[in-house]
Image (tube, rainbow, N blue to C red):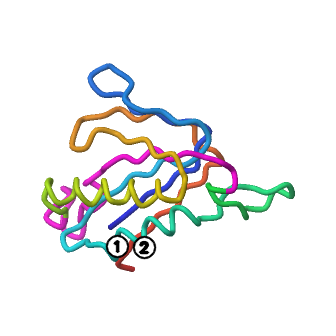
Amino acid sequence: MIALIQRVKSAKVVAQGKEVSSIDKGFLVFLGVEKGDDETDVEYISKKIVNLRIFEDEKGKMSKSIKEIGGSILLVSEFTLVGNLKKGYRPDFSLAENKEKAKKIYEEVAKMIEKEDIIVKLGIFGAYMEVFLINDGPVTIILNSKK
């Protein structure tokens, strides 16, 4: 499982011209589910997201988690994160989990994060979406549950 995490001042998802979800300060997380991902990957990624200390403290040092600053998470499914570009220039998406299982895992990640009293908003799984954000920093972190 791959998560691309962006620290944001705000973010929103629009689908078919309508706003689906939005957050203020927090994380915009793009999540790619790979074949073979299971509960271990869900726990790893969820725990890392919840405890990731990339918000600044009073001294300007990155030492606070999303829980500590009272932030929210906008979680967006993105199978293209698992695209393989080792050969040629066209991504190979054969490592992406099938849609049904990937959706279940995506929802499990959201539920696990919510158990930590963090507000989680979702995009529309499998839909074409426009994602708008104001990146704070910019700060972008990539997590891979397999590495």
Query: Which residue is rendered at x = 73% and y = 64% of the image?
Result: 63
Q: Where, quadrant-wise, is the N terminus in this rendering?
A: bottom left
Label ID, residue 44? 2
Residue type beneath disc 2: Tyr
Could you tell me if the residues under marks 1 and 2 are in contact, i.e. CB atoms within 8 Å?
A: yes
Q: Position of residue 145 (x, y in %)?
A: 38, 74
From the viewer's perspective, is 105 left or right of 51? left
Q: Quadrant of the C terminus?
A: bottom left
Specify the label residue 41 is tagged with: 1
Residue 94: quarter of image = bottom left
Alpha carbons under labels 1 and 2: distance apart: 5 Å
- Rendered residue at 42%/67% (across/down): 45
The amino acid pointed to by label 1 is Asp
List x then y, in percent, for residue 39. Answer: 30, 73
Q: Residue furthest bottom?
A: 147
| Position of residue 26 measured from the top left corner of the image (x, y, whole percent) | 58, 46
- Which range of residues does the magenta coloring cover? 68-95
Image quadrant where residue 33 sits: bottom left
> Which residue occupies the foreground of this view, 87 or 14?
14
- 130 or 42, which is in the foreground? 42
Label annotation for residue 66: none
Residue situated in front as seen by the camera: 63 or 68: 68
Q: Is residue 51 left or right of residue 81?
A: right
Residue drawn at (34%, 77%) of the image = 40
Residue 121 drawn above or below residue 146: above
